[in-house]
Amino acid sequence: MSARRRLLLFPEATGAEVLLLRRSIRAHLLQSPGSVIECVVLDGHVDLRTVEAVARLQLTARRAGGCIRLAGPPRLAELLLLTGVAAAAGLRVQVIGQPKEREEAGGVQEEGDAGDPVA
């Protein structure tokens, strides 16, 4: 049975923080080859920097003989699919939370006085 480890990634993580996570992944996989590392991306401002960080974490894990299982906000899943990183890196994303519900567009509604002539 392979050991599991959980890492938290903040969307606004700096390059130095991602480097520390990569070193942690590598060290864990040297001790437990073939294990799955759970990477939870916390909700925040997810952008292409976050996508790059996730791709680097997966690449590090694969080079060390393991992989990451990714969980994150809906926007991260959308960006990973849109950029093609999910397919290229072999990532599956478990969406945490629900997408924000949008109001249905109900057309234009204006209030007016019934005595006003229509222009």
Image (tube, grey):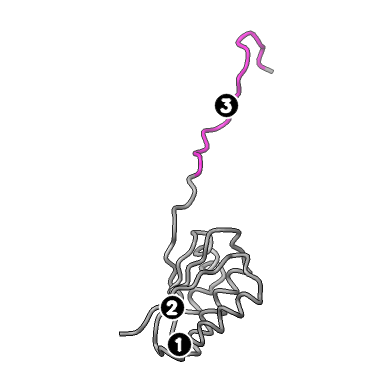
Between discs 3 and 2, the one toward the N terminus: 2
Height in image: 84 above or below 118? below
C-beta proximity under 8 Å, tags 1 and 3: no
Residue type at mark 2?
Ile
Task: Please identify, in this view, whether the residue under mark 1 or under mark 3 is nearer the observer.
Answer: 1
Label 1 – label 3 distance at C-alpha: 60 Å
Taking depth in this image into account, of 80 and 11 the one nearest to the observer is 11
Identity of the residue furthest to the left in this view? 1
Q: Residue 44's quadrant in the figure? A: bottom right
C-beta proximity under 8 Å, tags 1 and 2: yes
- The residue singled out by tag 2 in the image is 37
Residue type at mark 1?
Leu
- The residue singled out by tag 3 in the image is 109
Taken as a whole, is the magenta stretch helix, strand or loop? loop
Q: Does the magenta stretch include residue 15?
A: no
Q: Give the range drawn in magenta.
A: 102-118
| Residue beneath the point at 43% across and 85% down | 66
Tell me the element at label 2.
Answer: strand
- Quarter of the image where the C terminus is located: top right
Q: Does the magenta stretch include residue 107?
A: yes
Instruction: Locate residue 49 relative to residue 104 in the image: left or right.
Output: right
Between discs 1 and 3, the one toward the N terminus: 1
Between discs 1 and 2, the one toward the N terminus: 1
Task: Please identify, in this view, whether the residue under mark 3 or under mark 2 is nearer the observer.
Answer: 2
Could you tell me residue 50's position as x and y percent? 59, 68
- The residue singled out by tag 1 in the image is 29
Residue type at mark 3?
Gln
Could you tell me residue 31's position as x and y percent? 43, 90
